[in-house]
Image: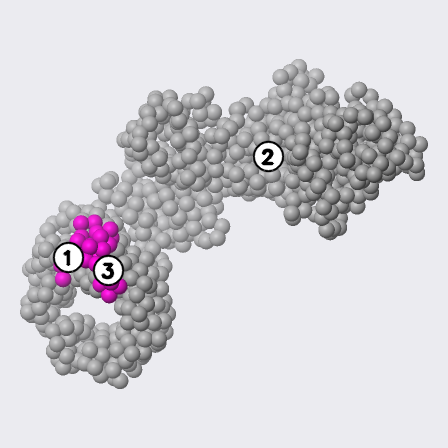
Amino acid sequence: MLMINTLPGSSGLLKEPSLSDVCIFLSCVSAEFRLYREELRRYLSRPNVAVKVQEDFIVTGGETLEMLDDYIRRCDVVIHLVGNSTGAMAQAPSVAAIHARYPDFGERLPLEEFLGEAGPPLSYTQWEAWLALYHGRRLIIATPADDDERDEGRMPDPAQQAHLARLELIERYPGIRFRSPIHFAAEVWRSGLLDILIGAGLVRRIVHLLYKSLGTLFKGRDVLFEDLALYLGPVPQGQAQPTKVVALTGMGGVGKTRLALEYAWRQADACPVRLLVGADSADALSRNLAALCSETILDLPEQAETDEGKQNDAVLRWLNQHVGWLLILDNIDTEAAAVAVEALLPRLSGGHVLMTSRLPNWSAGIKAVPVDLLSPDASVEFLLSRTSGRRRQQADDPLVAARLTEELGCLALGLEQAGAYIAQRRSTFGQYLAQWQCHRDEVLSWFDERLMQYPRSIAITWQTSFDQLGSPARRLLQRLAWFAPEPIPETLLDIPSLGQSGLVADLHGAMVELDAFSLVMRATDAPFFEVHRLVQEVTRSDLRQGDEHSVLVEALRWVNAAFVGDPVDVHSWTVLEPLVLHARAVAVHADLAGITDPTAHLMNQVSLLLLEKAAYAEAEPLLRRALAIGEASFGTEKPEFAIHLNNLAQLLKATNRLDEAEPLMRRALKIDEARLGSGHREVAVDLNNLAQLLKDRNELAEAELLMRRALVIARVIDEAASFGTGHPPVISGYLSNLAVLLFETRRTGEAESLMREALELDEAHFGPEHPLVANRLSNLASILHASHRLDEAGPLMHRALAIFKEKLGASHHRVAILLNNLADLLMDTNQLTDAEPLMREALVIFEETFGSSHPRVAIQLNNLGALLKKTNRWIEAESLLRRALIISVKSSGIDHPSTRTVHRNYIELLEALGRTDDEIEHELTSLIPGDSGNCPT
C-alpha cells in the first residue's frame, strides 16, 4: 500500500483533503510496478501531499470503482503506468454504476462498447485513466523503456496496446519513458508535478543564478549534461537524504561556470531552488552565503543581522529544512577556498551541490568531472550562431570561423570573447582574425561583461592561478609557453634543465603544481600533457623583455638537449617524433628573437627527420632557415655551412629538383675541399652525394668517376686507421654504392665483386649478424637475382631478413624492403600465392613507419598492383595503382622517375581494362590536373 497522510480504507470512507493538500493518484499494476511505486512514495514524502493507489480502495463488495472515482475526481494529478499486465478487471456492477453516474461517458470518451452489460471488460487500472480524463484531471502517462527494471518479466498483454491506442485517438500519449524506479520518480517530478506543488503553496521557486541561459547558443556539451544527470541523479525530496556533490574541474575559461548555469536552467522542472554562490576564497564563500538571506532571495529574518556567521547558519538551516535545491559553488580555485568548501559540505542535506574549480583533486564523496575544450565543430557552430545577424557575412564564413577556432584552441571563453567583439563591431571573421594576429595583446585584454556574461578578459582569467605558483612551476610554465600547443611527452621532464639560479629544477614537482591548478592538461591514457595555446599566449605576453629572452634560451637549450639521436634512424623516432612539433616551435620563436645557437642545429635535426619521413613541405623552410642562420653565423666558406648546403640539396634531390640541388652540392664539395683538403672524409661524402644526383640524371660517366674518387679517399682513410682498434671500415659503403651503379649499367661481374668485398669487410668488423651485413647481403642478393641466379639469391635474402627482424624488429622498414625483394624473387619463379602476403606485409610496415602518403608507400602499392594484375585481379590493381600515382605526384612531382614508372603502369592497366584513349585521358586529368596522359617517360 502506498499512502502518505494515511486515510482509513477499511470502511470505504475518505477524509476530505484540506484546500492546501495536493492529492496524487498512482495508477499501476502493483505486481508489475511495486518497486516504482515505493520509490515514488519515498520521493514525494512530505507534509500536505497525499499519494493513493488502487489497493487503498479495495473492499469486499463491488464498490471499488466507485470509490476510485470519488478520489480521482478530487485529486490533482493521476500518474498512469502502462506496462505488460492489465491487472484485475472491473466488475460489471461497478461499471454500470459509473455509467449511471455519468450517462455521457461514452459520448465524451471512446468507451461506448465497454459500458454495456455485454461489452468487453476494462481493468481497474485502465478505468483509472479514463476517469481522470472524464473529470478533467491532469493525466501523466508513463511507459517503461525496453531496458527497464521491473518486478517480474511478463509477456505483453494485447489489451494494454489496445488501451494505449484508444488514448491516442483523443491525442493522449505517453509523456514519460522510464528505465528504473529512480529514473521514473525523477521524470514524474519533472513532468509538471513541481508546478502543482508550487501552485498549492507547498514549494517555493527561488532562482538566483546571476546570468541568463544561452539557450540554443550553448553548444557541444550534451554528453556532459548526460553525465551530470547520471552522477547527481534525481533531486532529493527528503530532508534526511544526503547531498550529492559534483565538481566540474578544468582550466580557466573552459566553460565550467557556464556548464553549471545551463544545467541549473535546464533543471527548472525538477528543481525549485537554484542558487549560485561565488566561492573564490573562504571570505567570499562566507560573504556570498550570507547574502542569500536577502529579501530578493531567501527572504530570511536574519537578513538584517550584522553577524555574518549567524546569517550563514540561517541559510544552512533553511536549506536543510527544505528539499529539492541545487547550489552552485563557483570558482573554487584556491586551496584555502577548497578547504572552506569541504568544511561546509557535511552541514548540508536534501539537495545537490555543483562546484566549479580549477583544482582537479577532491576528497572522497565528491565526484570530479573534467570539463574539456569544445570540439572544433561545436566551436564553429557557436561562432556562426553567436554572430549571426551582427557580423558582416562572407561566402567563406565557415572556413574562416574554423581557422579562428583553431587559433583560439576551442576555448569557450576565447570563442565568446571573439563572438562578442565581432558582434559589437559588426566586423567579419577575417577582420577579427587579422586583428588577433597583428594586435594580439590588445584583443586578449578586451572584454565587456554585459555582452560576454563573464567577469574577466582572457588576459587576466588565469592570473589567480599564476599568482599561486611557486618559482619552479612558474618558470616551467614560462618555458612551455614557447612550445607547440600539442601533446608534450612527460619524458621531457627527465631532461635536466638549468633554472635561473643555475640549479637543476624539480620539473616533475613543478608539473604536479601546474596540474593542481589546471594550467596543464594531462592525458589519462598516455604519458603526455598539453598547455593550451591561450595560456601560452598570456604567459608569453606577461614576460618582461629581459625575462622573455632568458626563458626562451632556457626552453631552446632544454628541448635541444632532449632531441638526441640520429634523425635518419627509425630507432630514434620513438624519442624524437613526440618532440618534433615542439622543437620546431621553439626554434622558430628563437630565430625570430635573433637567437642563433643552438637554433640552427635544432632546425637542422628536425628537418632531417621530416626529410626521412618525406614531409618535404615541412622540412624545406627549416632547412632554408638553418642555411641562412649558418651563413650568418659561420660565413659561406666553412664546413659547417657546407653541411647545411648538403642537407638542403638532399631535399631538393628527393623532390626531383635536381637543377637546384646540383649547384648546392658542388658548392659544398668546393668548400670542403678548400677547407678540409681533397682527401678528407667529408669530401668523400660530398662526392658520393653528388654522384647519386648525377646517377638520377643519367649522367653515369661523371657519377662513376666521383664514386671512384670517393672510394679511393675511403680506402686511404681505412688504411691509415688500420693500426687502431675498433675502427669501422669507411670503404664498405662506397663499395656498395659503386656496385649498385655498376649493376645498373649491366656490369654485374664487377658489381658482384665489389659487393662481396663490402660484405667481407663488414662481416669481419661487425660480425655476421649486424644490420650493415644484412644490408650488404640484400644488395648482393639483388645482383644475383638480376643475374638469374635465383638459387643463390634466395638464401641470402632469407638470411638478411632474419638479421633485420632480430636486430631491428619485425616492423622496421628495412624488413619491408627485404619482404618486397623476396616477393619479387617468388614472382619470377611464378610463386604468386606465396609472394602476395609478403608484399601486403611490406605495405603495412611502410604505412605504419612513414605514413600513408610516403613515396615508399607509393612504390609498394605499385609493386602489389603489378602482382594483382598478373593474377587477373584488375579492379583491385587499378585501385592500388591509382592511389600510388596520387601519392607519387603529390610527394615527388610528376617528373620524378618513380612517378613516371607508376604513371606508365597505370596507363597500361587502363588499356588492359579496355578503356579508350579519351577515357584514360579523363581519368588521368581527374587525378593529375593538367595531365593528358602524356607524362614524360
Distance CA(mark 3)–CA(mark 1)? 16 Å
In terms of secondary structure, where does tag 3 sit? loop
Q: Which residues are magenta?
A: 911-937
**Quadrant occupied by the N terminus:** top right
- The local crowd at label 2, few if under 14, some if 14 to 19, many if 20 or more residues have their Cα within 10 Å, is many
Image location of residue 362, percent across then percent down: 58, 42
- Is residue 606 among the parts visible in the rendering? yes
Image check: 247 left or right of 63?
left
Image location of residue 705, percent across then percent down: 7, 70
Verify whether residue 921 appears in magenta.
yes
Q: Which residue is mark 2?
A: 354
Q: Sequence order check: which comes first, mark 3 or mark 1? A: 3
Vertical comparison of 96 with 577: above or below: above
Question: What amino acid is at disc 2?
Answer: Leu
In terms of secondary structure, where does tag 2 sit? strand
Image check: 168 left or right of 521?
right
The quadrant holding residue 348 is: top right
The quadrant holding residue 860 is: bottom left
Q: Which residue is mark 1?
A: 934
- Is residue 858 among the parts visible in the rendering? no
Q: Which residue is mark 3?
A: 915
Q: Nearer the viewer, mark 2 or mark 1?
A: 1
Q: Nearer the viewer, mark 3 or mark 1?
A: 3
Image location of residue 890, percent across then percent down: 24, 53
